[in-house]
Amino acid sequence: MKRMIFTLAFGMLIAIGVNAQEVKKEKGECCAIEVQNEKGDWYVGAGDISNTPWTGWSLSPTIGYAPIDNLMVGMNLSQADSTEDLGVGLHARYFWKGYFAYAATEGLSLKDTKLGVGRMFTFRRGGVYLDPRVVYNTTKKTTNLELGLGLKF
């Protein structure tokens, strides 16, 4: 029942977000370029909030920065429970035509790499974003749907 409610809520947010996307257009020599994130944008998020039961949620804060237009790099911290060590991971997103390519590491080693694609929905008021993505884990050889939530400013 909880999964069905979560799925319905997720679908409604996606439907609303499709029209709330904020995109800046820059004129180049030959054509207009869509800029989904601008140089200097900051992202603060909650990491992956999908595929986890309500009682098993753990805090996984993420922070990101856009050093140039359409590129965001960042890091995240994760700790499943108090018995595990704190983990640090790195991630990057390159935005293109409203979508993004995603690459991340679990820890600071390139052995645990995730690759994926997704779309970031930015709601105009408050800078809230939602970013569903399909991610392939190169170590576990699995494909998962992940969902991030956060603030963009």
Image (tube, rainbow, N blue to C red):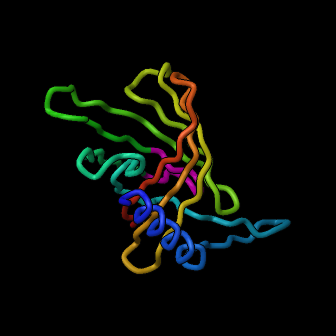
Taking the spot 36% from the left edge, 76% from the top edge, the residue there is 126
Q: Residue furthest front?
A: 1
Name the foreground residue: 79 vs 97: 79
Q: Is residue 101 above or below residue 82?
A: below
Taking the spot 55% from the left edge, 50% from the top edge, the residue there is 133
Left or right? Give the position of 122 relative to 62: right
> Secondary structure of the magenta portion, mostly?
strand
Q: Is residue 80 above or below residue 50?
A: above
Name the foreground residue: 117 vs 92: 117
Q: Is residue 79 above or below residue 71?
A: above
Taking the spot 49% from the left edge, 69% from the top edge, the residue there is 122
Chain part drawn in magenta: 65-73
Across and down, in percent, residue 68 comes to 55, 53
Across and down, in percent, residue 52 comes to 35, 46
Across and down, in percent, residue 56 comes to 26, 44
Q: Residue furthest right?
A: 30
Q: Dividing the image into 4 quarters, which one contains the N terminus?
A: bottom left
Left or right? Give the position of 77 relative to 135: left
